[in-house]
Image (cartoon, helix red, strand yellow):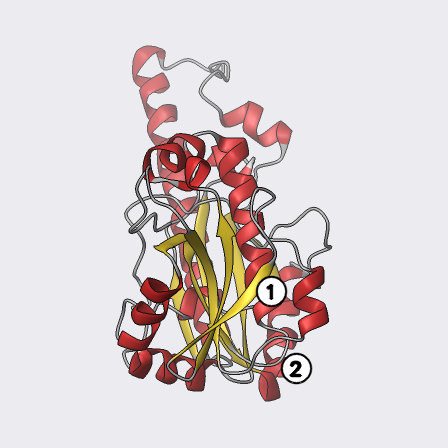
Amino acid sequence: MSASVAGPAATGLLCAFAVTRTPPDPAGLAAARGHEEGGPLRVLYAGGLCLVVQDVPADLFGEEALTERLNRPEDLERCARAHHRGVEAAAGRGPVVPLPMATLYRGDLTAARAVAARRQVLDTLLDRLRDRTEWAVKVHAAEAEPEAAAATGPGAPARSGGGGGRGYLSRVSARRREQQGARGKALAEAEAVDAALRRHAVAATRHRPQSERLTGRRAPQLLNAAYLVEDARRADFTAALARFTAGGTHPAVRVDASGPWIPYSFARWDEDPQADPDPHAAPDQEADPDPRADPDQEAPS
C-alpha cells in the first residue's frame, strides 16, 4: 500500500491504478468499477505513458481517514479488490505496471510529474512484462491423517509397555525426531517443486509464507512463490505445474496454484527492473489480501 502524498485536507485527490503505453478501450474503461466512492475511471496522459486514475473524495481517502479504513479488514479487502479492477481495466490492450494499492496524488499535475520522473524505469518494466504473465504457487506440508495425528499429537496417551519415566521420555524424543524428519522432507520437496518450475519461468520470487490465520489450514505453508512466464512457454510451465498439483510425485507436500495473472510481483517501479528478483526475498510482513481474489470473477484455471 502507498498512501503517499494525500493529507486529510487535500482537494482533488487522485487514486492511480496502473501505467500502460496503450490507452484502454474507452467502452471497457467506462464499464469498469474502481472504488465505489470515487468517480469514473479515466486516462491521464503523462510523458508518453497512460495512467489509469480515479477521482476520489478527500474525506475518505485523506491520510488519516484512509489509515483508519485500511485497519478494518473488510475495508482493506474492499480497497484491494477495487484496486485490482482498476488494474484490469488498464490491461486491456497491452502490458501494464500495477501501482501499489492506494497510491494517491494531489491532482493531475502531481500524478503526471511522478510518472514522467520514472519514465525510464516504467519503459523498462513494460518491455520486460510484455507477453508474460504471473503464476502464483503455494506449497503446504501434507496434513497428517486424523488417526495418525491423534496417535502422535501432544495429547496422545502414553503407550503401555513399561519403562516408566525413561520409556516415556524415549517415546517423546522419538516422536520429535519423526516430526523433524517429516518437516525436513516436506521442505526438501517444496524446494524441488520451486526448482522445477523455475526452469520454465523467466523469473521467480518468493513472498513470506502466510500464517494459518490467512490460509485456513493447520499444515504450515512452506513456499509462497510467484513465477513470471512467457506466453510462448505457458504450456510447458502448466504441464510441469499439473504434475505437482495432481499429487503423488511429492507426497510430503500439497501444491496449489493460480494464474495467469497480471504480473504484480514483477512490476515494482520503486526497484531496479534490470535486477533479477531475489529468489529468497520476502517482505517484512504478511501480504495484504490478494487483490486478484475478486468474488465477482472466477479465478482462471
Q: Position of residue 29 (x, y in %)?
A: 65, 66
Q: Position of residue 170 (x, y in %)?
A: 33, 25
At 44% from the left and 20% from the top, the residue drawn is: 154
Q: Position of residue 183 (x, y in %)?
A: 41, 46
Pointer 2 and pointer 1: residues touching (CB < 8 Å)? no
Q: Nearer the viewer, residue 212 or 276?
A: 276
Left or right placement of residue 149 versus residue 67 in this view: right
Mark 2 secondary-structure assignment: helix
Q: Amino acid at mark 1?
A: Glu
At 54% from the left and 32% from the top, the residue drawn is: 74
According to the image, label 2 marks what residue?
235
Where 201 sits versus 191, above or below? below
Q: Amino acid at mark 2?
A: Ala
Where 89 sits versus 234, above or below? above
Q: Nearer the viewer, residue 209 or 76?
A: 76
Mark 2 surroundings within 10 Å by alpha-carbon count, few (fewer than 14), some (14 through 19), many (20 or more): few
According to the image, label 1 marks what residue?
88
At 48% from the left and 15% from the top, the residue drawn is: 155
